């Protein structure tokens, strides 16, 4: 096999877990990487799910954007890798 | 947050993939391209959650169809493809995702590129297009191991025969039908150039498959002149399996 093994998925794969915290869809949200300044949709982030939590990394510079751990009735969310996350609110009216 | 769906139909797509139709009483409808998380709970309370793309177009019957490929070492997919029966109940979370979606309001040319079971959310887009009587021009490039592994073959052919605005290209990677013009192989620059929309038409591209497939196909689209903001990707794989 010549195929290179990738061990990440993308922001779409983390959206179900993040829906425990966010009412709004995160995949279409735009976020800015605090390290390189790239502005991308969260769906485009490289997401690592093999460990005990979820780690999202910038698709451009691979620095950590977000970490999420769900353990013993507690969720820990670290978003210091993003300077902001901009979420669409129009879907609120659609679903209510 | 978790909804309960009742299995109302099962259909084998291939020897290793099964479509499961669920009726979900409180389903808020969905958009083509979205997925759900499925949660299985064992008698000892152990739970396993996996993501599956929705294959069906949005409908008023509160039905959700998933197509699940069995992974040899999977924890959830063997159950869903071999054990689950009509009348069983499954827990679902979703619909999830608002980025990897196609809505009937979109009128631009659409390029779909599927790797294996990455076809599933793209099929929802093709079905949604037909149901909404959209006239958007669709092209599908479907990379698949061998003819026996093709999902929805007859339905795709019928949709494409009825409406010449949906064109299909199969790219077989391991074995082809007899007298197939292209030897088995992965999607490459020549195939993209010959079968996908030219970049000057500024198509919106949806690419879904295993991560290695998506990276390669998205790279080829960019190399052929498409801009990254017109390419939407969804990656899946066993790495999504939570421990």
Image (cartoon, helix red, strand yellow):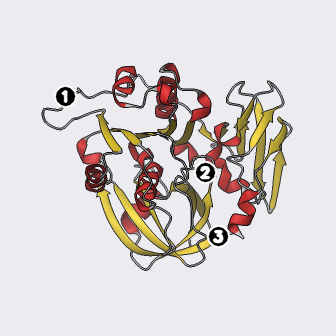
Of the numbered discs 3 and 2, the one sitting upstream in the chain is: 3
Q: What mark, if any, has residue B181 been given in the picture?
A: 1
Q: Position of residue B66 (x, y in %)?
A: 45, 61
Residue A71 position by quadrant? bottom right
Q: Quadrant of the C terminus of chain A?
A: bottom right
Calculate the distance from the C-alpha at mark 3 to the C-alpha at mark 1. 48 Å
Give the mark nearer the N terminus: 3 vs 1: 3
Q: Position of residue A40 (x, y in %)?
A: 71, 35
Answer whether residue A4 is visible to the viewer in this image.
no
Q: Residue at x 40, y 49 (%)?
A: B72
Disc 2 or 1, which lies upstream in sequence?
1
Residue mark closest to the camera, 2 vs 1: 1
Label 2 sits on a secondary structure element that is: loop
User: Crowdedness of circle 2 by 10 Å Cα count: few (<14), some, many (20+)?
Assistant: some
Q: Name the spot of residue A57 as percent of width and height, x first.
A: 71, 34
**Subunit of label 2:** B
Using the image, determine if residue B95 lies above or below residue B218. below
Q: Quadrant of the N terminus of chain A?
A: top left
Residue highlighted by disc 3: B2
* The one of B84 and B164 positioned closer to us in this rendering: B164
Relative to residue A12, is residue B132 drawn left or right? left
The residue positioned 62% from the left and 32% from the top of the image is B229
Position of A52 relative to B44 (above/below): above
How many residues crowd mark 1 within 10 Å: few (<14), some (14–19), many (20+)?
few
Q: Which residue is mark 2?
A: B242
Position above or below: B24 against B126: below
């Amino acid at each position: 096999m010549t195929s290179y093994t990738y061990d990440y998925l993308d922001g779409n794969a983390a959206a179900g877990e993040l829906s425990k915290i966010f009412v709004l869809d995160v995949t279409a949200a735009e976020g800015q990487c605090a390290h390189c300044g790239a502005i991308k949709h969260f769906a485009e982030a490289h997401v690592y799910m093999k460990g005990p939590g979820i780690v999202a990394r910038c698709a451009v510079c691979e620095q950590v954007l977000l970490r999420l751990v769900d353990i013993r009735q507690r969720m820990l969310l670290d978003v210091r890798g993003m300077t902001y996350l901009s979420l669409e609110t129009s879907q609120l009216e659609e679903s209510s | 947050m978790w909804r309960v769906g009742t299995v109302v139909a099962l259909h084998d797509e291939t020897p290793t993939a099964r479509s499961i139709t669920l009726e979900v009483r409180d389903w808020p409808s969905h958009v083509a391209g979205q997925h759900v998380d499925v949660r299985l709970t064992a008698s000892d309370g152990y739970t396993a959650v996996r993501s599956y793309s929705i294959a069906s177009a949005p409908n008023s019957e509160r039905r959700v169809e998933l197509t699940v490929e069995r992974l040899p070492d999977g924890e959830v997919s063997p159950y869903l493809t071999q054990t689950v029966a009509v009348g069983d109940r499954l827990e679902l979370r979703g619909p999830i995702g608002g980025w990897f979606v196609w809505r009937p309001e979109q009128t631009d040319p659409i390029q779909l590129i599927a790797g294996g079971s990455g076809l599933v959310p793209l099929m929802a887009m093709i079905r949604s297009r037909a149901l909404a009587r959209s006239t958007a021009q669709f092209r599908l490039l479907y990379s698949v191991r061998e003819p026996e592994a093709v999902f929805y073959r007859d339905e795709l052919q019928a949709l494409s025969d009825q409406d010449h605005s949906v064109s299909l290209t199969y790219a077989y990677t391991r074995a082809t039908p007899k007298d197939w013009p292209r030897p088995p192989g992965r999607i490459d620059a020549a195939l993209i150039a010959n079968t996908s929309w030219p970049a000057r038409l500024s198509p919106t591209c949806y690419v879904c498959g295993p991560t290695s497939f998506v990276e390669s196909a998205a790279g080829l689209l960019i190399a052929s002149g498409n801009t990254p903001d017109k390419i939407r990707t969804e990656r899946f794989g066993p790495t999504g399996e939570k421990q």
